[in-house]
Image (tube, helix red, strand yellow):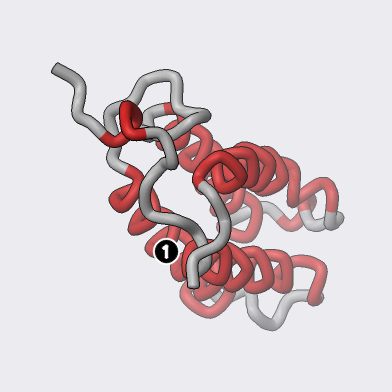
Amino acid sequence: MRFIPTKVHGVLDYLVGIALILAPWLFGFASMGGPAVVIPIVLGAGLIVYSLLTRYEWGPVKLIPMPVHLVFDVVASIFLAASPWLFGFASAPPNAWAPHVVVGITVIIVVIFSEPQPARAELRTTRA
């Protein structure tokens, strides 16, 4: 059952993107440096960029279809959740690795329940 409209998903995209960029400072692991800090910043910025390009209510440049956006979300989230083990910081204090895992899993859950198309028909059509 998909009950999260793309309009809500879009708002979450921008909020999560900003939160990922700020995560190293919000959770106090910025001084750690390395992949633990770089990965959420890069993924957050990437999320904002591809959200701006998504064909939904909050995308000003409607190039990427919503189903493709959802695939990007899942791939980025799997990478984010696995990053503590892929890059060797899983043994760091939990404030460094737990946000990666929690946000990654949470975004996958949001994708599972997100509608794959905007409600308005004109957003579903391709640009001429």
- Amino acid identity at mark 1: Val
Rendered-image quadrant of the C terminus = top left
For image coordinates 61% across by 45% down, the residue present is 8
- Whether residue 11 is situated above or below residue 86 in the rendered picture: above
Rendered location of residue 19, percent (x, y): 72, 45
User: Which residue extends farthest left?
Assistant: 128
Rendered location of residue 50, percent (x, y): 41, 36
Camera-nearest residue between 74 and 90: 74
56 lies left or right of 95: left
Q: Residue 13 sits in which quadrant?
A: top right
Rendered location of residue 82, percent (x, y): 51, 75
Camera-nearest residue between 102 and 113: 113
For image coordinates 68% across by 71% down, the residue present is 102
Mark 1, residue position: 74
Camera-nearest residue between 91 and 68: 68
Camera-nearest residue between 15 and 42: 15
Rendered location of residue 33, percent (x, y): 68, 52
- Whether residue 112 is situated above or below residue 5 in the rendered picture: below
68 lies left or right of 2: left
- Whether residue 74 is situated above or below residue 19 in the rendered picture: below
- Secondary structure, mark 1, is helix
* Residue 41 can be seen, yes or no: no
Mark 1: few/some/many CA within 10 Å (<14, 14-19, 20+) = many
Tally the marks.
1
For image coordinates 32% across by 27% down, the residue present is 122
